[in-house]
Structures are given as structure tokens and as C-alpha cells.
Amino acid sequence: MASSYLVLPTRLVLDWMMNEELKEIAIRLQIGNYQRHIFLCVGPSCCSAQIGAGAWKKLKDELKVRNLSLSDAPSACYRTKVQCLRICTGGPILVVYPEGYWYSGMTEDRIDRFIDEQILKGEPIEEWIFARNPIG
């Protein structure tokens, strides 16, 4: 007598479980709602680890306080801390997409202005931009 159960190879079951887990994480992180993705290089080649850590903490905290992180706000951003954007000088280096603006010297004292002008108003801060590579 034939079984009425479908036997799936272990790899297919694991792939399905991982896919479901990834979907849950994406929902929790609100991936799909973001208008911008910010990458911040925290060193140690472009700046000291202490300066990079200070800039990252300020960016993370300010986006959260302003409801711009893990939200569906109109200016919501996803942020990613990286250790190298291959510039290795003038850091912390920050890249914001889809605009593709590359900012230098993004220490914690510059984060408020960056959020106010670039993120909330959509106005680039020309004197801090050293390169452009827009997407789209």
C-alpha cells in the first residue's frame, strides 16, 4: 500500500525552513519599506575605532529617536555598519543609496545635520560629498 505522505529530501526541508525564517526577519526589520540605505564605515583604516564607534552610535540612536529606523515612515532608512568601503582615509565614510552620495568625515557631530538635510529634506551636503554613484 502506497503512503499518502510526501517525503521530501532533507535539503528541501531545510531550505524551506530557512526561507521562512528569512521572511520573518525581513518582516521584523521592515525590509521593503525603506527609502534609503545608509552604509557607515567605522574603520579602523579610515578612522580610529573610537571615532567610528561614536559615529555609528549617533547614527543608530538618532534614526531610532526620529522614527526613521525599523519603521514605515516616509523617510525611513536602513542602516548598515561596515568595516571597509575601500577608501581608507578621511573617515568615517558614509554612503547613502539610492542617491549614491559618498560622504567623508562623518563623525558623530555631523550626523544630526546629515539626517536633517540629506534624509529628511533630500538635500545633499555638497561640502562633505567626495563622490557620486547613484542607483537607478
Image: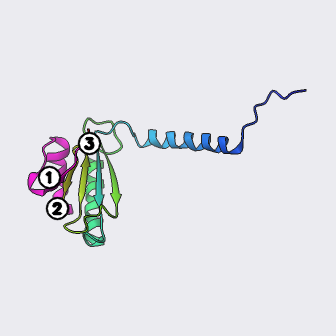
- Circle 2 — which element? helix
Q: Give the quarter of the figure containing the C terminus.
A: top left
In the rendered structure, the answer to whether residue 18 lies left or right of residue 120 reads: right
- Circle 3 — which element? loop
Indicate the quadrant where residue 57 lies: bottom left
Q: Which residue is mark 1?
A: 113
Q: Residue drawn at (20%, 63%), measured in percent from left and top? A: 107
| Disc number placed over residue 109 in the picture, else none | 2
Q: Is residue 59 above or below residue 5?
A: below
Along the viewing direction, whichever of 49 and 5 lies nearer the viewer = 5
> In front of the other: label 3 or label 2?
3
What's under tag 1, amino acid-wise?
Answer: Arg
Q: Give the quarter of the figure containing the N terminus.
A: top right
Number of other residues with Cα within 10 Å of mark 1, as a class: few under 14, some 14 to 19, many 20 or more: few
Q: Is residue 108 magenta?
A: yes
Q: Which residue is mark 3?
A: 135
Along the viewing direction, whichever of 74 and 103 lies nearer the viewer = 103
Q: Residue drawn at (17%, 46%), measured in percent from left and top? A: 118
What's under tag 3, amino acid-wise?
Answer: Ile
| Label 3, label 1: how far apart the Cα atoms are | 23 Å
What's under tag 2, amino acid-wise?
Answer: Asp
Number of other residues with Cα within 10 Å of mark 2, as a class: few under 14, some 14 to 19, many 20 or more: few
**Rendering coords of residue 45 (x, y %):** 28, 71
Tell me where the magenta segment starts and ends, as one range. 105-134
